[in-house]
Amino acid sequence: MRRAAVLTGRDARSASRRFLADGPQTVREALELPDCVVEVFVSTGALARHHDLVQRALSASAEVHVCNEQAIDALSGSRAPQGIVAVCRFVDVPLAAALAARPLLAVVAAHVREPGNAGALIRCADAAGAGLVVLGGSSVDPYNDKAVRATAGSLFHQQVVVAPSVAATIEALHREGFTVLAADAAGATSLETMLADGLLRGRVAWLFGNESWGIPAEELAAADRVVAVPIFGKAESLNVATAAAVCLYATVWAQRMGGDGSGSLSCS
């Protein structure tokens, strides 16, 4: 239990390359990934509720520990612990390995520091069928408890890369033939124009920036285009996860439907 508890800290996670997956849905998704789950801790009160997960963990040769409620609460970062937490092996992959699968769509989080936003980006990328998500530069640790919860299990489906340099990531994407698009409210090109002109049909990598100060100038300059999501109402802006959802689904639409200019993003 003590070894698991230290995984609430980033240094301990990095040293052991293990992290905590909190809650039944997250544990369920982790158990779908072979050799990911090492241990499962379940409270006495939750044992019957999560009997199926306990059995699956045992079948996967993971150790199962039945603990009191206070012990589980100490492992869980949630305000409403659900009685089950798993210790998992890191799931991130090298950038070269993710690119080797020749994905059509990639996401780069440039210095995204809010765990909920980083997790939501991973979840959105998974839903849109992106081939990889890069957490670049000073982005938050994807194994932060809030980030893991915000992925809603997509962390275990999505190819996730942790990269110290956003610039080097952009260079690697360019070498692989990606068009790198930076999402920025001040962009000179509208997403609606990109879609209507068929400019989203090829291999596309979207760059999304920090919640407060966006994408640094040198990284914006390295992108092929800086693209603004149109706002048709009176909202001042979109948060990063919502903007990502719009950009990614517009791209998937273009890639799958041919992007022949027959569609638009206008509201009906």
Image (cartoon, rainbow, N blue to C red):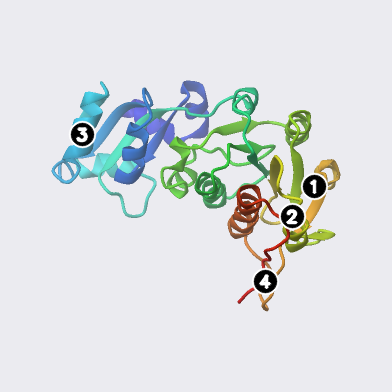
Residue 23 placement: quadrant: top left
For the residues marked 1 and 2, what is the alpha-carbon distance in whole angstroms?
Answer: 8 Å
User: What SS does tag 3 mark?
Assistant: helix
Q: Earlier in the sequence, mark 3 or mark 1?
A: 3
For the residues marked 3 and 1, what is the alpha-carbon distance in whole angstroms?
Answer: 46 Å
> As displayed, is residue 27 above or below residue 91?
below
Q: Earlier in the sequence, mark 4 or mark 1?
A: 1
Depth order, front residue of 214/201: 201
Q: Earlier in the sequence, mark 4 or mark 3?
A: 3
Give the residue at mark 1: 216
For the residues marked 4 and 3, what is the alpha-carbon distance in whole angstroms?
Answer: 48 Å
Depth order, front residue of 173/212: 173
Q: Amino acid at mark 2?
A: Trp
Please report contact status of discs 1 and 2: CB closer than 8 Å, yes or no: yes
Residue 213: mark in rendering = 2
Give the residue at mark 4: 266
Quadrant placement of the C terminus:
bottom right
Select label 4 or label 1 by which is in front: 4
